[in-house]
Image (tube, grey):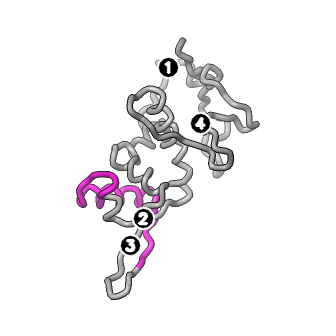
Amino acid sequence: MIPVVTLVGPLKDRDSWSAVGHCPIEKTMAVVGTKSAMLIMREAYYGTTRFDDFAQRVGITNAAASARLTELVDAGLLTKRPYREPGKRTRHEYVLTQAGTDLMPVVWAMFEWGLRYLEDTRLRLTHLGCGAEARVEIRCADDHVVPPDELGIKLGRRRGDGMVPA
């Protein structure tokens, strides 16, 4: 059985409102909705910082790498830091910001889904502390694990540190 997310409050009547332009999924996809953007984020998490390394490890052209890196910097997921090798001109490396680090559970959820449903996925997420396989899960603010059939969506208004009920 496929779990269903429960919409509550003003969201319950789907004919009276539209999520278009307001949905966090839609807005996030506008930032990282390309394959190359997600793979650049993966590489940044793995420690890649140099332009040429991103292009090579993601398997994209320099033009595509330049466009994606610019988009990710503009979105605040990566930041540029100057560096200079002896005898060379100053260049920039790209490093994760806090927002970029906070996006990584999305990347790991995709990783976990791929392990479960796609063939030839030999990589595993593991806890370096004990060696056990790691997994992505949803927890509420009171630290309870939230199974999919107990997940709901409420309409809220934005507050500096999160959402508050409308």
- Disc number placed over residue 135 in the picture, else none: 4
Q: Are marks 2 and 1 in contact (CB under 8 Å)?
A: no
Question: Which is nearer the N-term, disc 1 or disc 3?
Answer: 1
Residue 30 part of the magenta-drawn span: no
Task: Name the residue type under label 3.
Answer: His
**Is any part of residue 77 visible from this angle?**
no
Question: Which is nearer the N-term, disc 3 or disc 4?
Answer: 3
- In the picture shown, does residue 100 fall above or below 124? below
Pointer 1 local density, CA inside 10 Å: few below 14, some 14–19, many at least 20: few
Task: Name the residue type under label 2.
Answer: Thr
Task: Name the residue type under label 4.
Answer: Arg
- Disc number placed over residue 31 in the picture, else none: none
From which residue to which does the magenta span run?
Answer: 56-83
Residue beneath disc 2: 49
Q: Is residue 11 left or right of residue 26?
A: right
Question: Which is nearer the N-term, disc 2 or disc 1?
Answer: 1
